[in-house]
Structure formats: C-alpha cells, structure tokens
C-alpha cells in the first residue's frame, strides 16, 4: 500500500525577528487556524495606545512562539521566552501584565514557572494563562492548584485566545481603577497578597507621621525594588505607593479633625505633611471638601 499526504502551503513573507533564539522542539502544536491565517509581520505599524498591556509569551517551539507573537502584537506589547528559566529573567527586566505559557519546556516547565511566580511577592498577582497540548485531568488540577487563571488546550482557536487575553486585561484594569476603597479594604485576594497588604498597612501605621519617610524606605522594608512595588500597589490598591502613603495620612487626619479641636496645621504636621496649604489641597482632593468644612460636617 502507498499513502500520500498533501499539505497545502503558501509563502507568507519574512517572519518578524524573534527575541528568544533556541533550537526548536520537534513537537509542534499550532493553533487550529494556523494554516489558514498568515502570520502577521512587523511591517504593519502597531499603535501603542491600542495595546492592552505587556504580555510575556513562554513557549519553547520557535514557530508557535512566532505565530503567537504575530497573532497578538496588535493588542499587546510582546516579550517572549523559550522556557521558564528565561521567563524569570524577562519578569525581572520588564513590567509584565500577563503571562501566557506552555507547560512542557526544557530547563523549567510551565508549572514550575507558575509556582515561582506565585511564591514571589513581586509577581504573585500577575495573571497566568496556560496553553498546553496536555488534556489530562492531572495536569489541569496541577495548574489550578497553583492558581493558574485560565487553561487553554492546543490546538487553540485564535479568536478565543485573543478574547480571553482581552478579558484578562479588562479585569486587571477594573481592579486597578478600584481606588475609591480605603487602604486595606480590598476585594478578595490571595493569602499571599493579603499578607502584602497587611505588611504595607503596618509600615504605614508606624511611619506615616515621619516627614522624611520615603517610598524607597517602604520598598526596602518589603525587599522589593521600586518598580515592583509600584506595580504591586497599582494591582492591589489601585494607587501608586506615593498615593497610598498620602491617602493613609489624610485618613488619619480626617479622624483627628473629627475627634479633636486641634488646629489644622498641627494635625497636618502630626500626619507627616509639613505644608498646611498642601495638606488642605490634598485633603480636598481626597474628601471633596477642605478640612474646616469636613470638621463642621463631622460635628
């Protein structure tokens, strides 16, 4: 017997250069629509204002990595890595909003990468999406136990992947915009993130009255660099570290205005704000009225 298999193919031009050069695995898992849709290249400009964030793609197969990059680069700023070990370096060097990772990879697989990300205070809140050819229940359960946000199987549908990532970006944005909440009054978070919130609140309670305290001191206290601290507070509080400190001080000032007859300037100084005019402006921004009106209304 003789069997002939014919696979239609067409020239689609030069692929965009990839920033993760590595010998490819022979195991190729393209998407369901890879053969019918050409890989986009970087000849078409991408408008940064339309991007949803920075996406880290972790995939050991070069062709699939390039396909994913071409598929998603109109919506995302793309960073790529060929295995989990390389991905950790990318996470340290870039502000990553979402990770999309394969499971079966050399050096460090996707589940080991997910565990490292979840156990690191600087990265524990980053959404992690698994893209895998494995369909067994054991693998899915392992991913879910490590708090993977979504598990998609190969071959995947291009549009489903785009929409899943877009929905993830919207969820991140909604959480970051939830800045009307008081410090510590957070939505449901993981135990590790709650521990981070508690650490920040304890530091604020101990240091808010110090005129000379700086955000670098908070970063050092938490053993984080300032960039990681900013991303973390934006994710969990919806505010920059500086704004978290300012609003904590203003909250304490509001309590003192309500419960004492002390001068506004004295209260401002006790809360670590040396300028009375700056204090009044910040207070009005936070509560909608100046300190004197707040005191009268509270009475």
Image (cartoon, rainbow, N blue to C red):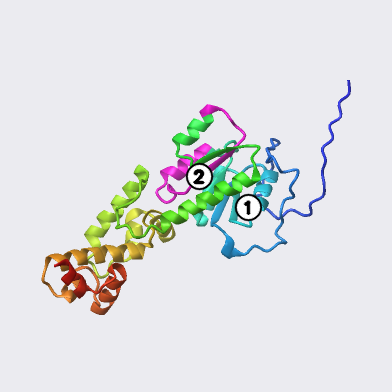
Most foreground residue, 24 or 233: 233
Q: Secondary structure at mark 2?
A: strand
Q: How many marks?
A: 2
Among the 4 quarters of the image, the one containing residue 74: bottom right
The residue that appears at 48% across and 31% down in the rendered structure is 141
Q: Which residues are magenta?
A: 111-138
Which of pointers 2 and 1 lies earlier in the amino acid sequence? 1
Residue 137 percent coordinates (x, y) = 53, 27
Labels 2 and 1 touching (C-beta < 8 A):
no
Among the 4 quarters of the image, the one containing residue 49: bottom right
Vertical order, 242 against 29 (above or below): below
Residue on which the image places disc 2: 128
Q: Is residue 25 magenta?
A: no
Residue 176 percent coordinates (x, y) = 42, 57
Vertical order, 225 against 87 (above or below): below
Left/right of residue 245 with respect to residue 177 in the rendered view:
left
The residue that appears at 25% across and 65% down in the rendered structure is 249
The residue that appears at 59% across and 53% down in the rendered structure is 79
**Badge number at residue 72:** 1
Q: Residue furthest top?
A: 1
Mark 1 surroundings within 10 Å by alpha-carbon count, few (fewer than 14), some (14 through 19), many (20 or more): some
The residue that appears at 70% across and 55% down in the rendered structure is 17
Among the 4 quarters of the image, the one containing residue 221: bottom left
Most foreground residue, 184 or 213: 184
Q: Is residue 126 magenta?
A: yes
Mark 2 surroundings within 10 Å by alpha-carbon count, few (fewer than 14), some (14 through 19), many (20 or more): many
Res. 215 visible in picture: no
- Cα distance in 3D space between marks 2 and 1: 16 Å
Left/right of residue 37 with respect to residue 181 in the rendered view:
right
């Amino acid at each position: 017997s003789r069997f002939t298999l014919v696979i239609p193919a067409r020239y689609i031009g030069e692929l965009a250069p990839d920033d993760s050069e590595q010998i490819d695995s022979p195991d190729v898992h393209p998407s369901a629509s890879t053969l019918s849709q050409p890989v986009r290249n970087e000849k078409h400009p991408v408008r940064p204002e339309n991007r949803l964030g920075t996406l880290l793609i972790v995939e050991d197969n070069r062709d699939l990595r390039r396909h994913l990059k071409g598929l998603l680069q109109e919506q995302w700023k793309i960073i790529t890595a060929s295995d989990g070990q390389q991905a950790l370096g990318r996470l340290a060097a870039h502000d990553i909003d979402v990770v999309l990772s394969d499971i079966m990879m050399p050096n460090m697989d996707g589940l080991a990468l997910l565990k490292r990300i979840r156990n690191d205070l600087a990265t524990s809140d980053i959404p992690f999406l698994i893209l895998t050819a494995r369909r067994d229940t054991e693998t899915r359960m392992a991913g879910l136990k490590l708090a993977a946000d979504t598990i998609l199987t190969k071959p995947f549908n291009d549009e489903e992947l785009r929409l899943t990532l877009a929905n993830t970006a919207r969820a991140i944005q909604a959480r970051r915009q939830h800045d009307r909440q008081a410090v510590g009054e957070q939505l449901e978070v993981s135990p590790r993130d709650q521990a981070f919130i508690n650490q920040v609140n304890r530091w604020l309670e101990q240091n808010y009255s110090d005129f000379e305290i700086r955000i670098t001191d908070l970063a050092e206290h938490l053993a984080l660099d300032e960039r990681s601290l900013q991303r973390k507070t934006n994710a969990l509080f919806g505010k920059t570290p500086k704004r978290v400190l300012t609003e904590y001080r203003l909250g304490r000032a509001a309590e003192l205005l309500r419960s004492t007859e002390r001068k506004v300037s004295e209260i401002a100084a006790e809360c670590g704000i040396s300028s009375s005019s700056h204090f009044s402006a910040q207070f009005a921004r936070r509560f909608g009225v100046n300190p004197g009106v707040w005191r009268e209304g509270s009475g």
